[in-house]
Image (tube, rainbow, N blue to C red):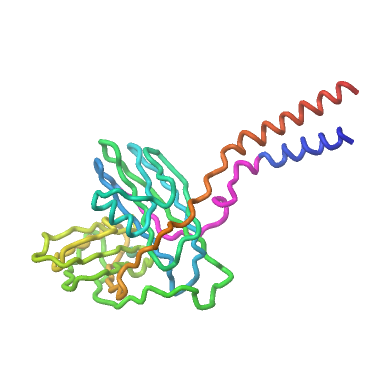
Amino acid sequence: MVRRLAIGLAIAFVLLTPLAFVNPAFAAHKATYKSGVDVLDTEGWEGHFLWLRSPAFSYTGQVYWEFRADGDVVDALFMTWGEFRNFREGRPFDTITEPQLGVQEGVEGAFGLSTDFPYILVFRNPGNQSVTVTWELFAEIDWRRLGEPPSGPKLNLTFQQGSPPLAKDESWETTLQEPGYYLGYCRPHADMTALIEVVPAPSPAPQLAVAIRDYGFHPEMIRIPVGTPLLWTNHDGVEHSVQIGLLPEGIPDAPAPLPAPSTPFPWWLLVLIPAAGALAFVFVYRRRQED
Ligand SMILES: [Cu+2]
């Protein structure tokens, strides 16, 4: 009886060991929310926001991101809008998930995010040479609700102005004359978005150049004094455009407490399961020899 049980356990361990290499959270099919390539100079950073509201479908509040750095290592920081503003101003800030510091590549996720607020993923170059980060953000969709009205409100954009289609190396200049929060997006690529904060100021700043490349806006998180000209230039081989809508309710921030931290990859399983399998094998082998 004991022997049969041991054999059964040994077989089960061997068959199940490969599963330890598959984290079900990361292995499931995810819908891409946004992706891009950032080129970060020394101590440079770029922020990318996700806001889980859509007129087309419902998000579940689960997101994942993957990134790979070429040239050097990066820090990856995932935070609320309010903490992002602390980060941008050089004040102390909190992240939602454990910060990934000085890594060449990473996979991380967060659960239980609200559809009401934007969240910001920051890639920061901690080193002293330029680094290129290729990244992708995924957001789980509740496919059961597809075709039904989405659960959360939409962004209720009020369209302001838009560029014609921009071919490679073509530019479009615009100036926002009213303080407020704006969403910039591309038509036809709806997942290309930028957040534009126009703040009251006695005088405008010099023109800010925004590069459109690799299906993204750089910078994507824009803060300018009112009246500052924005010059959008397409560097991609495909046509993009810039559409700008006012966010009438501004940008709300997630209240404390922060969402629960994400589940880390269970690395200990990679050791435990093969070890248990090996032990069971040794046990069976000894029993057989005793017989
Ligand atoms: Cu586009």
Please tell me which residue is depicted at 24% across the width and 65% down the height of the picture: 197
Q: Give x and y (percent) for residue 43.
A: 25, 42
Please tell me which residue is depicted at 62% across the width and 33% down the height of the picture: 271
Q: Is residue 128 above or below residue 166?
A: above
Image position of 268 (left or right of 214) = right
Q: Magenta stretch containing residue 217, yes or no?
A: no
The residue positioned farthest toward the left in the image shown: 203
Q: Magenta stretch containing residue 29, yes or no?
A: yes
Count of labels shown? 0
Region in magenta: 18-38
Question: Would you identify the image quadrant in which residue 235 lies?
Answer: bottom left
Q: In this view, does 241 lie above or below 285?
A: below
Q: Is residue 100 above or below residue 58?
A: above
Front position in the image: 250 or 45: 250
Please tell me which residue is depicted at 26% across the width and 69% down the height of the picture: 181
**Which image quarter holds the C terminus?**
top right
Q: Give x and y (percent) for residue 73.
A: 35, 38
The residue positioned farthest toward the top in the image shown: 290
Q: Give x and y (percent) for residue 87.
A: 29, 51
Q: Give x and y (percent) for residue 110.
A: 48, 54
Front position in the image: 199 or 91: 91
Please tell me which residue is depicted at 56% across the width and 68% down the height of the picture: 143
Image position of 117 (left or right of 39) = right
Quadrant location, ligand no. 1:
bottom left
**Which image quarter holds the N terminus?**
top right
Question: Would you identify the image quadrant in which residue 116 lies?
Answer: bottom left
The residue positioned farthest toward the front in the image shown: 257
